[in-house]
Image (tube, coloured by chain):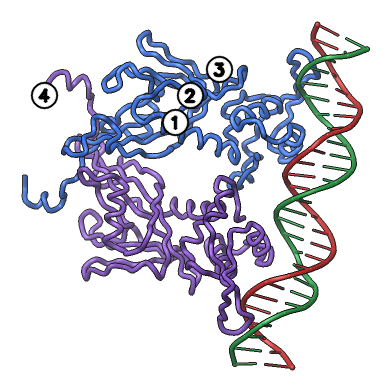
Chain colours: A blue, B purple, C red, D green
Amino acid sequence: MKKSSLIDTPNLANFKVGVDNVIFSVDRIQNRVLVLLVIRQNAPFLGWWSLPSTLVRTGESLEAAADRILAEKIRVENLYLEQLYTFDGLGRDPRDDPNSFATRYLTVSYFALVRFDEAALIADGVSGIAWYPIEQLPNLAFDHSEILKYGYQRLRNKLEYSPVAFEVLPQEFTLNDLYQLYVTVLGESFSDYSNFRTRLLKLGFLLDTGVKVSRGAGRPATLYRFDAQAFAPYKDQPFVFV
Amino acid sequence: MKKSSLIDTPNLANFKVGVDNVIFSVDRIQNRVLVLLVIRQNAPFLGWWSLPSTLVRTGESLEAAADRILAEKIRVENLYLEQLYTFDGLGRDPRDDPNSFATRYLTVSYFALVRFDEAALIADGVSGIAWYPIEQLPNLAFDHSEILKYGYQRLRNKLEYSPVAFEVLPQEFTLNDLYQLYVTVLGESFSDYSNFRTRLLKLGFLLDTGVKVSRGAGRPATLYRFDAQAFAPYKDQPFVFV
DNA sequence: ACAAAAGTGTTTTTTATACACCCATGC
DNA sequence: GCATGGGTGTATAAAAAACACTTTTGT
């Protein structure tokens, strides 16, 4: 080792970097928020449920790694991953030993929302993979419970000011579908349906398709479509959807 | 190299991890938002202005690294650092070569607000260090301009729903001080002073100290103090300060 | 006295909330 | 025809926005 490198780099830690994906969906039949979980195939935490995650390879960007691990698990179009938070591996990963000069682990978490029916789980015969309702989570590997909790918080926040709801709903939906989704994620105590309707329709980014659907008894509902163009003015505005 | 390790770890990238601090303050005399910048003492970008940053050492947490580099630059009490975003070094840092198997660089950025007068810059005789107005930034090393922009956005957002303003104002301040701060950061087009007053006072977390201060001509202003206790109910509520 | 800054009050408009009621359909 | 869910309207309360006006100081 050259002397100069000792001066330049005093005890720098060496890291491996992982990505953890928090992928949400909504079961609109049973009105439950779902999270994508997989069973770990490797030590540590072999056989435990965990968020879909992987370590970043040489020449691979963080996002590329996040996309790669996800592509192995589900097939879905236009998946938009958003960075959540970076968790310090110090003392967190059992592979980390704070007292050693060994490699440390850092994980960057990503967040996405997908349509339940469009997301085809890839059952490769070996790997366990499942949508878990957020209310009935198993014990998770590493600090994945914490990460998931953080992601769930973000989901609820985003629902209030950004049009993420339309990433979960089908292209065409009824106003009740939209309302139910909000109730499911944000809980009861949500605004009155009638007022929700009026407010959203006044905003003008829900296009009336003219088509009506009948779901069992009751008056048929109008199908709407989200108009991203018309939403633009509200982009940087707080709390479009209360 | 053992065969098993080849299977377990296919081409994992090796990282060094850096932290970049985006430290804001407000010059309440000239009504300008300031950012703490330093001159780099090492290659690459030797001699360039940059955010205060460092590489994480063995056994040191990310936050600890962020605190360390900051403690070398300014002296301030109760600095609360908040994580901003993690930037992928791939192709960003000139030390990175995407085609090589060399070490990659990842940087996690942190964000804070400090009181201008309380933050004593540490002039160690060598290192350049300065508060730069956000409107007159020099060219910055690495992608620090981008990081700074991201941080500035966060600052403006936080001002709207969280009581960060009181981290910049002195313990006791007039309502006009508070109003001016909002105008400085959020720009003109901000709410009417009179309405701002009424709204904030009604919220009840500004304690009237009874003390009055006279600043030149005009009626003396009441000094207020922020009551964190009384703010608690608004903690998870959007847009307390419009 | 008067300008300057602080602070109060009033009026108008907009938005939120609650809830009553009508409409179209399946059974 | 009546239960069921869709959709409209109204009445009240609260909040936001605009702005006129009063109060207290320095000079």
Residue A35, disc = 2
Q: Position of residue B63 (x, y in %)?
A: 32, 48
Specify the subunit that label 2 lies on: A
Numbered marks: total: 4
Q: CA distance from mark 1 to mark 2?
A: 9 Å
Q: Look at the picture and state if A134 lies above or below B204.
A: above
Report helix, strand or loop for mark 1: helix
Q: Residues within 10 Å of mark 3 (few under 14, many from 20)?
A: some
Q: CA distance from mark 4 to mark 2?
A: 38 Å
**Image marks 2 and 3: residues in contact by CB distance under 8 Å:** no
Q: Look at the picture and state if A95 lies above or below A229.
A: above
Comparing labels 4 and 2, the label whose residue is closer to the camera: 2
Q: Which residue is mark 1?
A: A148
Q: Which residue is mark 4?
A: B1
Same chain, marks 1 and 3?
Answer: yes
* Mark positioned earlier in the residue sequence (2 or 3): 2
Comparing labels 2 and 3, the label whose residue is closer to the camera: 2
The amino acid on which the numbered mark 2 sits, given as a three-letter code, is Val
Q: Which residue is mark 3?
A: A117
Q: Quadrant of the N terminus of chain B?
A: top left
Q: CA distance from mark 4 to mark 3?
A: 45 Å
**Image marks 1 and 3: residues in contact by CB distance under 8 Å:** no
**Image marks 1 and 2: residues in contact by CB distance under 8 Å:** yes
The amino acid on which the numbered mark 1 sits, given as a three-letter code, is Leu
Specify the subunit that label 3 lies on: A
Report helix, strand or loop for mark 2: strand
Report helix, strand or loop for mark 4: loop
* Mark positioned earlier in the residue sequence (1 or 2): 2
The amino acid on which the numbered mark 3 sits, given as a three-letter code, is Asp
Q: Position of residue B235 (x, y in %)?
A: 55, 48
Residue at the image position 38 percent from the left and 57 percent from the top: B79
